[in-house]
Amino acid sequence: MRMMFESFARGLLGIRYRRVFREMAVCALLFWALRSTGYRVRIASEVLYIMSMLCAAGVMWRTVSSAENAGHLDGLLMLPFHRQKLVFACVGACGIYTLFTAVMPLTAALAAVAVQGPAEWALSWLCAGNGIGMAAAVWLYRKHKALMVCWGVFQIMGIFCLETGFLWCLLAGNLMLVLLLLAKADAYELRPYAEKGKARRTGSGKYAVFRYFVRYLTAHKNYLVNTGMLAVVAAALPFFFQGMDRQFVLPIGFAILSLNTPLGVLLSCDPSLERAVRSLPGQIRGFFAPYGVFVFLCNGALDLVFLGSWQICGNRTLPADYGMAVLFCALGAAGTVFMEYFFPIRGWKTENDLWRHPRKYVVPAALLLAAGIVSEII
């Protein structure tokens, strides 16, 4: 089992677990930077527990279901293996990766500003452990979708409804159930299911690239979920900015909504596509120009939701506001294409690494700076 675990851990955590020490140093720096601000806030215990569980479960799901993990499994499944050992080796390596790359940074950021007791932090880590284990179990038993959904809803309801003592018992018992499910799981279920049916042609012509983008997003449901969550943020932002001046709210809102990570790394997340695009003539007109238009349209849809919610809140919109939205959409799309063309992200191990790369903040940060300039001008 040790050799199988190290084969997974080496790809996720680096040789001799170098990434673990790097993440610990980053978390220490993050904690010190936020702690030095002197800002303190009391977070509701239930919110802390839910944040820990959902953050851990989301990252664990992306890691265990990633294409890179599936490619590594292909080689191991061709060799003689012990079913339980392979399951626990894969889940253990992905779980440790999740703890150090997601749970620990979240805990460092919250511990620096939150006023919580040691018992609450211990319970939050138990919630994170449950989130990691449940994500792995749901992935292995994803054939039983309805049962898995009910299981997750039951856990969330338990966090909100139970007292602390009963919650400890619930989470401890749930963790034992997770271990039992993992012990009984089929190791072949770690591999994503092959798509049924014949592959469809992408087609040719000027709309082929757009069809590719649409099919790529529909094949990666987590990308659509991220865009849907941004739509919810767009609808909620005007309620948080109530009473503020429109010349400040609108530019800042447009800049925030440009942080659509999946759309900003559509080329970086597919190395084979990047190699194909780079090797063909007419890259800019054939791929990058339609890519920019696609990002422009997606950002424009989010900005329309934002402006619609702004009107629902009783605020007046002017024609200049729609012109400002078009300007920010164009700048965001141009910046995204520029970064993907000149500075693609390479050398990443999992999609989580790709989504957490600092490069994704370059375009939104530039737009926030532009938003400050625009708010001063108007």
Image (cartoon, helix red, strand yellow):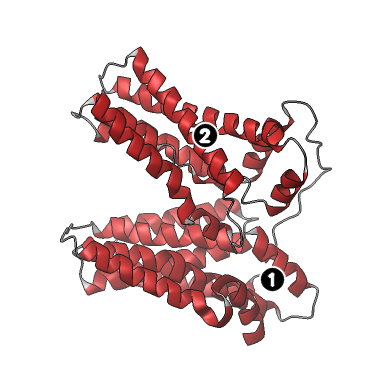
- Residue at 81 percent across and 38 percent down: it is 200
Q: Is residue 1 in view?
A: no
Q: Residue furthest bottom?
A: 2
Locate residue 68, reporting x and y percent: 66, 62
Question: How far apart are the alpha carbons under marks 2 and 1?
Answer: 42 Å
Q: Mark 2 belongs to which amino acid?
A: Ala
Residue 254 figure quarter: top left
Residue 44 figure quarter: bottom left
Residue 333, numbered label: 2
**Residue 323 vertical position relative to residue 58 in the rendered view, above or below:** above
Classify mark 1: helix, strand or loop: helix
Q: Is residue 310 in view?
A: yes
Locate residue 272, reporting x and y percent: 73, 52
In the image, is 288 to the left or to the right of 136?
A: right
Q: Mark 1 belongs to which amino acid?
A: Ala
Locate residue 160, reporting x and y percent: 31, 55
Q: To which residue does mark 1 refer?
A: 187
**Labels 2 and 1 touching (C-beta < 8 A):** no
Mark 2: give few (<14), some (14-19) or many (20+) Cα within 10 Å.
many
Residue 226, numbered label: none
Which of the pair 292/316 is nearer the observer?
292
- Residue at 19 percent across and 64 percent down: it is 36
Which quadrant, please, contains the C terminus?
A: top left
- Residue at 21 percent across and 26 percent down: it is 245
